[in-house]
Amino acid sequence: MDLGEFQIPGNSDPNQKTSHLSLDIGGSLIKLVYFSTNDGDDDDELGRSGKGSVGVSNGNRSFPVLKGRLHFSKFETRKINDCLDFIQTKRLHIGGCQLLGALPIEKTIIKATGGGAYKYADLFKEKLGICLDKEDEMDCLVAGANFLLKAVHQEAFTYLDGKKEFVQIDHNDLYPYLLVNIGSGVSMIKVEGDGKFERVSGTNVGGGTFWGLGRLLTKCKSFDELLELSHQGNNRVIDMLVGDIYGGTDYSKVGLSSTTIASSFGKAISDKKELQDYRPEDIARSLLRMISNNIGQIAYLNALRFGLKRIFFGGFFIRGHAYTMDTIAVAVHFWSKGEAKAMFLRHEGFLGALGAFMSYEKHGLDDLMVHHLTQKFPMSSLVGDKICSPLNGELNDNESIECSVYAS
Ligand SMILES: Nc1ncnc2c1ncn2[C@@H]1O[C@H](COP(=O)(O)OP(=O)(O)O)[C@@H](O)[C@H]1O
Ligand SMILES: CC(C)(COP(=O)(O)O)[C@@H](O)C(=O)NCCC(=O)O
């Protein structure tokens, strides 16, 4: 068995070995997933055979099973050098996946997806001496989502009226569903099985739009600052409501209440105010609501197009943010008259990177298959209208979860 295990210099745990680094290099963020084992790990009822590995039989084949952790990290794509430094310092590239008989470095292959796998291939070769083995972005998103929905307990949840509820996924009744990945832009994918999918729609109004416009309009220095700001804002200051147009009353004939947003940012037409006269928090709130609502609505229309009842939302735009999820869920609920359900994923931003990780197995470079993940962190709790969880905000940036993999 060669899992390309290497010790990580500078790591607080000298016994830790890493392997199978996978990357998703998107328009806004670079996501990393890698696997580590610990020499010192003790196990377990299965009867351990050293170095974190145990043997199990699966049908006709007997697989060694490695116990370890999957690690998740992210960097802003505009700061790609920080990511390269991180990989180099931790020597994650060395434990990528080396072809048998290859000289170290020379033929190290790292699975990578996202547009940046093309754009930055030369940079990775030049700086780290590694070849990015490109995997299709949609293939990876779907593989990552299917894997999470099947292997991770309490991965998917609904969010409505400030209430989060985990959804029990029946493996035999998972398909079909609509996967909406809200990254820089938005992709909508009808998923009918493992590797069986079609990208049915998309929109260019996505996470990049929120962050880009928000940065220009509010002068925020980071995405999280913008998100935090939106928390304190009131969108009604700047959005034109049905009541603003109808003299304070509902437009009940078509089912529009006076508080429904008739036109996002519409009040700015007649307010005789300049940008600086609006509070940045109100602008941030209005922008977040406009974009989330729009994505929720387009997602529902696509679900309707294909008769899909379940819509899973992923991508780092969501960021486990209560107001974002609430707006998307309300849009889906409203337009579907309660027929369709918006569901969110705890590892929302890592679908592509996980899919790339899974693809090490597909290509026979190394027979690797994650078959079980166990989360050891406490579950989320709600404080005010914000979910506080180890998977939220910055806390999910350097998270790791226990898992075991088949390897040969
Ligand atoms: N720390 C962050 N920096 C920049 N954007 C962030 C951050 N956290 C969340 N986002 C949001 O997530 C989006 C990127 O989501 P992601 O799924 O990583 O897509 P991509 O693959 O296009 O980078 C950004 O456009 C932004 O809206
Ligand atoms: C081009 C992309 C697939 C790239 O993925 P991303 O880096 O945004 O995650 C995505 O931005 C997208 O689907 N944009 C919307 C394009 C459209 O359908 O209009």
Image: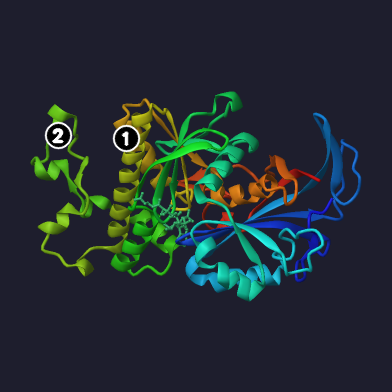
Residue 72, percent across and down? 62, 55
> Does residue 264 appear to the left or right of 48 in the view shown?
left
Using the image, tell me which numbered label, if any, was put on residue 301: 1
Q: For the point 57% across and 71% down, which residue is it? A: 122
Using the numbered discs, state the Cα–Cα distance from disc 2 to disc 1 in whole angstroms: 25 Å
Residue behind mark 2 = 250
Label 2: which secondary element: loop
Residue under the point 56% across and 73% down: 81
Is the residue marked 1 within 8 Å of ligand 2, measured from its CB?
no
Upstream in the sequence, badge 2 or badge 1?
2
Residue that appears at 9% across and 40% down: 246
Residue 153 shown left or right of residue 326 in the figure:
right
Question: Residue 316 versus residue 359: which sits nearer the camera?
Answer: 359
- Crowd around label 1: few <14 · some 14–19 · many ≥20 (10 Å): some
Q: From the viewer's perspective, is residue 332 above or below residue 6?
A: above
Asked whether residue 164 appears in the rendered view, the answer is no
Placement of 124 over or under 310, stated as above or below: below
Q: Which kind of residue does numbered mark 2 sit on?
A: Asp
Left or right of 384? Residue 111 is right
The amino acid type found where label 1 is placed reads Leu
* Of the pair 2 and 252, the residue shown nearer to us: 2
Which residue appears at 36% of the width and 39% of the height? 299
Q: Is mark 2 within 8 Å of ligand 1?
A: no
Where in the figure is residue 377, as x and y percent of width and height? 66, 46
Q: Is residue 17 above or below residue 189?
A: below
Disc 2 crowd rating (10 Å Cα; few below 14, some 14-19, many 20+) is some
Tell me where residue 3 appears, x and y as whole percent: 79, 54
Q: Is residue 92 visible?
A: yes
